[in-house]
């Protein structure tokens, strides 16, 4: 599943504004393949990635690959080298992956220990 399919699947419900949490929003075009919205209550602009693990990512397709392999017990350094990303990025993506996994109903992990 590509990033765009995953992002579109997660946005099937009516989006809510991350600023005021209102569900009164209107579509406001697409930017880089991602649907944008404008909140009618507070006037703020947001997109369907707001509040998700994909928010602020510059390489969402690579993050999806990283997140699929995060349970393979690699170290932060080895994963950084494998995906050609910085160690800090690897650490941040690992945290985002664990948060996303823990939100699942049948989550394989509840808490994570950080050893590297």
Image: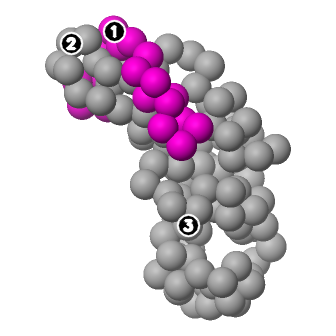
**Mark 3 to mark 2 CA distance (whole Å):** 33 Å
Q: Give the range drawn in magenta.
A: 18-36
Q: Where, by quadrant of the figure, is residue 70 drawn?
A: bottom right
Identity of the residue drawn at 46% across and 24% down: 29
For disc 3, the marked residue is 93
Which tag is nearer the camera, tag 1 or tag 3? 1
Q: Where, by quadrant of the figure, is residue 85 drawn?
A: bottom right
CB within 8 Å, label 1 to label 2: yes
Identity of the residue drawn at 65% across and 30% down: 8
Q: Residue 35 carries which label?
A: none
Q: What element carries label 3?
A: helix
Q: Which of 45 and 71 is in front in this view?
A: 45
Above-or-below relation of 12 to 2: above
Q: Within 10 Å of the Cα at label 2, are there few (<14), some (14-19), or many (20+) other Cα atoms?
A: few
How far across and down, in percent of the image, does residue 44 sit? Answer: 23, 27
For disc 1, the marked residue is 24
For disc 2, the marked residue is 41
């Amino acid at each position: 599943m590509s990033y765009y399919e995953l992002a579109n699947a997660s946005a099937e419900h009516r989006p809510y504004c991350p600023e005021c949490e209102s569900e009164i929003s209107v579509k406001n075009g697409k930017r880089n393949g991602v649907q944008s919205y404008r909140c009618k209550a507070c006037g703020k602009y947001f997109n369907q990635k707001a509040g998700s693990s994909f928010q602020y990512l510059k390489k969402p397709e690579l993050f999806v690959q990283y997140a699929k392999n995060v349970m393979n017990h690699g170290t932060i350094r080895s994963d950084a080298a494998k995906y050609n990303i910085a160690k800090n990025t690897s650490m941040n993506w690992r945290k985002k992956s664990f948060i996303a996994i823990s939100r699942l109903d049948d989550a394989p992990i509840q808490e994570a220990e950080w050893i590297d």
